Amino acid sequence: MKTLKLIFAILIIACSINCSTSKQTTAFHNDYKLETVEYNAMDSSIKDLLHNHMDKTKFKKGQSIKVSTFIKERKRIVKLIRENKNPDFSADKVSFVIDTTLLKNKFSVTAIIK
């Protein structure tokens, strides 16, 4: 759990540093590759919406952890929900949990929509 909290803190710091630049950098020295993506939404209709549009996700299996990918995916989720379910939906209701404990140099992402 401490590792997950540390990784999340590093990701937030990397975002605040890298959000103003257009360079694509990885947030970690070890190159972790994406294994799985899940969507967790309290509202079942939003969860269904996200699953129906999963082919449009910015996350691709095998890609490295990049802050820009999380930013793009958050924007995509917010736009999708605003256009189909709730025009007042805000970006602060979307967060991500990264799990690097699966396999060596692999990670999973869970998008949490409140």
Image (cartoon, rainbow, N blue to C red):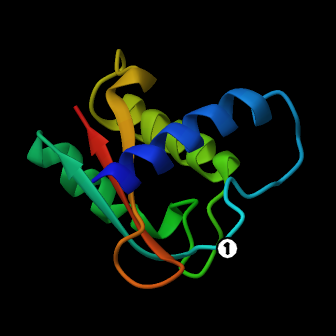
Residue at 50% over, 40% down: 74
27 or 22: nearer the viewer: 27
Of all residues, the one furthest to the front in this rendering is 2
| Drawn side of residue 90 relative to residue 33, left or right | left
- Residue position marked by numbered label 1 in the rendering: 31
Percent x, y for residue 20? 83, 27
| Apparent side of residue 50 relative to residue 33 in the rendered image (left or right) | left
Instruction: Give the vertical position of 30 relative to 105 (above or below).
Output: above
Q: Picture coordinates of residue 88 (x, y %)? A: 35, 15
Residue at position x 33%, y 26% in the image: 93
* Of 16 and 101, the residue lying toward us: 101
Circle 1 crowding by C-alpha within 10 Å: few under 14, some 14–19, many from 20: few
> Is 90 left or right of 45, judged from the image as shown?
right
* Residue at screen point 62% across, 45% down: 72
Q: Position of residue 80 (x, y in %)?
A: 43, 41
Residue 3, compared with residue 11, is above or below; it is below
Q: Quadrant of residue 66?
A: bottom right
Q: Position of residue 38 (x, y in %)?
A: 30, 63
Q: Secondary structure at mark 1?
A: loop
Quarter placement of the C terminus? top left
Tag 1: amino acid:
Asp
Q: Who is closer to the viewer here, 37 or 3?
A: 3
Q: Quadrant of residue 85?
A: top left
Report the side of 95 relative to 66 (left or right).
left
